[in-house]
Image (spheres, rainbow, N blue to C red):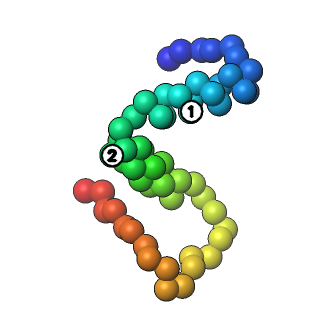
Amino acid sequence: MEIRFETKEESNRRRQEEFLKLSGGERVMNFLKLSMQMKMFPTSAKPDKSSNFIIEISSK
């Protein structure tokens, strides 16, 4: 674990630079991974039953 003392602007700039160093495929995979992790957070929102295109990735 690493502890950094930096301003919010410095932190955002560093994270953006690290993200932009990734290849396009790595960026997409990071986005999908984050989307999957967000599904684990509790919510009171009702599922949307619209006709939107939905990508579901099952984890085995």
Image coordinates of residue 29 in percent, x first then y, are 37, 47
Check disc 2 and report the residue beneath it.
25
Q: Residue 59 carries which label?
A: none
- Does residue 33 appear in this view? no
| Residue 34 seen in the current view | yes
- Label 1: few (<14), some (14–19) or many (≥20) C-alpha neighbours in 10 Å: few
Name the residue at 48% across, 34% down.
Answer: 19
Q: What residue type is labelled 2?
A: Gly
The residue pinned by badge 1 equals 16
Q: In this view, does 29 lie above or below 12?
A: below
Name which residue lies at 68% across and 22% down: 10
16 in relation to 5, above or below? below
Q: What element carries label 1?
A: helix
Which image quarter: residue 60?
A: bottom left
Q: Position of residue 30 (x, y in %)?
A: 42, 44
The answer to whether residue 54 is left or right of residue 16 is left
Residue drawn at the location 63% of the way across and 27% of the way down = 13
Q: Which of marks 2 and 1 is nearer the N terminus?
A: 1
Residue at the extreme left:
60
